[in-house]
Image: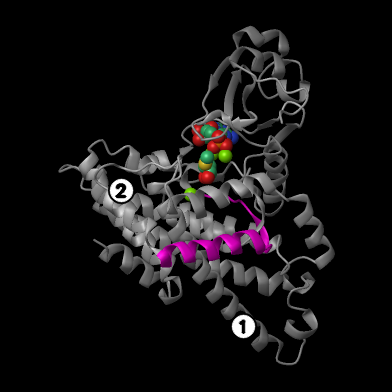
């Protein structure tokens, strides 16, 4: 149901909205200058409307959630409570990793609006930058820090169980999770009306996927994990379209899917999106720019995100694990008999399990972006259907292998070898 009091903004009314609220207007300009303000709707995501308001004092980003899925329209209703979740998640993430999260200025539950720091050019969406052929020298290190900080500090490794349980309740995000359960783990495996794929080139591949019992079972098991494992406050939609960056700085935006879920979902999703661009490189290569350097960089970045994340996460655990109830300090703390050895063993097992689940989620995410409702511009922007289909088929085969054989992919080097070898 539409939030009572909700009214959809447009480029005209957003000026009135901002000018009437001093906490917002101060970022843009005095209300009596409002006629000179510039407004653009820049939303390029699947769900929401995003306005940039610029005036003599600066700029502001205003995001409004309609009561439906934007790319589909009113026929697909969607909870507007996603704005409350996004506001709370931005604050929670900023508490642990402020350097990689835009500052939240405003949350209006009635109008389903948040306002936040405008990430000015040269910041652009990383997916767009990658399609243009850019490399981001600090991206992997920044993402590793973001993942380690947000996932560790919101988990039972860092929190007492009463605080942890209260957080799970606050971030219950039923409808958004159900959307993910449907479009990531179910729809790609049967002829759902929302699916699409490059046709006729991939028709046989898609038919094979739908007949693939092992893939169906693996996806269902991961859906259960996604639904049942309340491990940490995860972003829930951490793809390259949810990251704005320059060569030096990185911001993670759009946490409206945040909830207490498996850490491996965030890790797997971002690795999947880096590798989707790797598979798309062939379709963007030209004689003048064969994209060999970018291909190499995408593989290196995938490795660096995983290795940086796992190293930093374990460091945080070592330094700040004492307050968390998961591994009691009396058993795993520095003062405990064999405490160091127990902690080292616990960390090894934890990371092995996280890696295996991340590979599985990665596989499911790659597959859904090729044959589900929401594709990636990395592939969609390859104009020639035949060229695109070759890239997509390789990615699909890789995704299927990761999904079904996750337990056999022992480490990140092996995952990258699979990506390079798949035909
Ligand atoms: P959706 O939830 O619909 O995916 P996003 O939050 O991803 O919406 O935002 C859509 C687009 O709006 C982004 O791709 C980006 O171009 C722009 N955008 C979002 N937040 C900001 C921001 N804080 N600063 C600058 N641009 C932003
Ligand atoms: C209707 S599915 C829309 C998709 O866009 C979001 O960014 C999420 O990835 C979601 O699955
Ligand atoms: Mg988005
Ligand atoms: Mg979004
Ligand atoms: Mg995805």
Residue 144 in the image, given as x and y percentages of width and height? 53, 59
Determine which of the numbered discs, if any, sits on residue 324 in the image: none
- View quadrant of ligand 1: top right
Nearest-to-viewer mark from 2 and 1: 2
| 420 left or right, relative to 20 | left
What color scheme is it? one colour
Earlier sequence position, callout 2 versus callout 1: 2
Residue at 32% of width from left, 67% of height from top?
Answer: 418
Dot 2: few (<14), some (14–19), or many (≥20) neighbours within 10 Å?
many
Q: Is residue 172 above or below residue 222?
A: above
Mark 1 element type: helix
Residue at 56% of width from left, 60% of height from top?
Answer: 223
Dot 1: few (<14), some (14–19), or many (≥20) neighbours within 10 Å?
some
Quadrant for residue 166, please give it: bottom right
For the C terminus, give its image quadrant.
Answer: bottom left
Residue 394 in the image, given as x and y percentages of width and height? 28, 56
Q: Is residue 92 above or below residue 403?
A: above
Mark 2–mark 1 CB contact (< 8 Å): no
Residues 14 and 314: in front is 14
Distance of mark 2 from mark 1, alpha carbons? 39 Å
Q: Which residue is mark 2?
A: 280
Residue 369 in the image, given as x and y percentages of width and height? 42, 48
Q: Is residue 420 visible?
A: yes
Q: Which residue is mark 1?
A: 344
Q: Is residue 349 above or below residue 88?
A: below
Mark 2 element type: helix
> Magenta residues?
213-238
Q: Is residue 78 above or below residue 301?
A: above
Main SS class of the magenta portion in the image: helix
Q: Is residue 257 visible?
A: no
Residue at 53% of width from left, 20% of height from top?
Answer: 40
Residue 161 in the image, given as x and y percentages of width and height? 81, 67
């Amino acid at each position: 149901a539409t939030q009572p009091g909700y009214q959809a903004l447009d480029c005209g009314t957003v000026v009135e909205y901002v000018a009437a609220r001093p906490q917002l207007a101060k970022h843009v300009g005095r209300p009596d200058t409002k006629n000179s303000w510039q407004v653009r709707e820049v939303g390029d995501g699947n769900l929401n409307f995003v306005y940039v308001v610029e005036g003599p004092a600066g700029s502001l980003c205003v995001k409004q959630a309609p009561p439906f899925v934007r790319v589909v329209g009113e026929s697909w209703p969607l909870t507007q409570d996603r704005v409350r979740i996004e506001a709370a998640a931005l604050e929670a993430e900023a508490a642990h990793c402020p350097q990689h999260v835009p500052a939240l200025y405003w949350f209006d539950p009635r109008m389903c609006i948040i306002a936040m720091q405008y990430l000015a050019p040269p910041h652009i969406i990383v997916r767009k930058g990658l399609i243009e052929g850019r490399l981001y020298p600090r991206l992997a290190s920044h993402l590793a820090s973001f993942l380690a900080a947000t996932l560790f500090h919101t988990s039972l490794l860092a929190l007492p169980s009463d605080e942890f349980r209260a957080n799970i309740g606050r971030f219950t995000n039923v409808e958004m999770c159900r959307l993910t359960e449907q479009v990531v783990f179910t729809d790609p495996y049967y002829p759902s009306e929302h699916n699409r794929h490059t046709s006729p080139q991939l028709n046989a591949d898609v038919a094979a996927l739908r007949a693939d019992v092992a893939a169906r079972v693996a996806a269902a098991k991961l859906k259960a994990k996604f639904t049942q494992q309340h491990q940490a406050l995860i972003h829930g939609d951490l793809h390259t379209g949810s990251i704005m960056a320059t060569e030096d700085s990185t911001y993670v935006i759009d946490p409206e899917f945040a909830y207490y879920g498996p850490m491996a979902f965030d890790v797997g999703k971002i690795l999947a999106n880096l590798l989707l661009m790797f598979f798309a490189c062939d379709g963007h290569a030209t004689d003048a720019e064969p994209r060999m350097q970018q291909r190499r960089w995408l593989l290196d970045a995938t490795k660096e995100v995983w290795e940086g994340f796992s190293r930093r996460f374990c460091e945080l655990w070592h330094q700040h694990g004492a307050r968390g109830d998961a591994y009691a300090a009396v058993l795993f703390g520095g003062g405990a008999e064999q405490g160091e050895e127990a902690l080292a063993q616990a960390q090894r097992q934890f990371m092995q399990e996280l890696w295996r689940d991340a590979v599985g989620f990665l596989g499911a995410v790659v597959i859904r972006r090729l044959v589900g409702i929401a594709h990636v511009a990395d592939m969609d922007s390859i104009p020639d259907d035949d060229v695109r289909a070759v890239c997509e088929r390789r990615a699909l085969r890789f995704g299927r292998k990761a999904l079904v054989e996750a337990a056999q992919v022992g480490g990140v080097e092996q995952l990258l070898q699979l990506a390079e070898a798949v035909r």
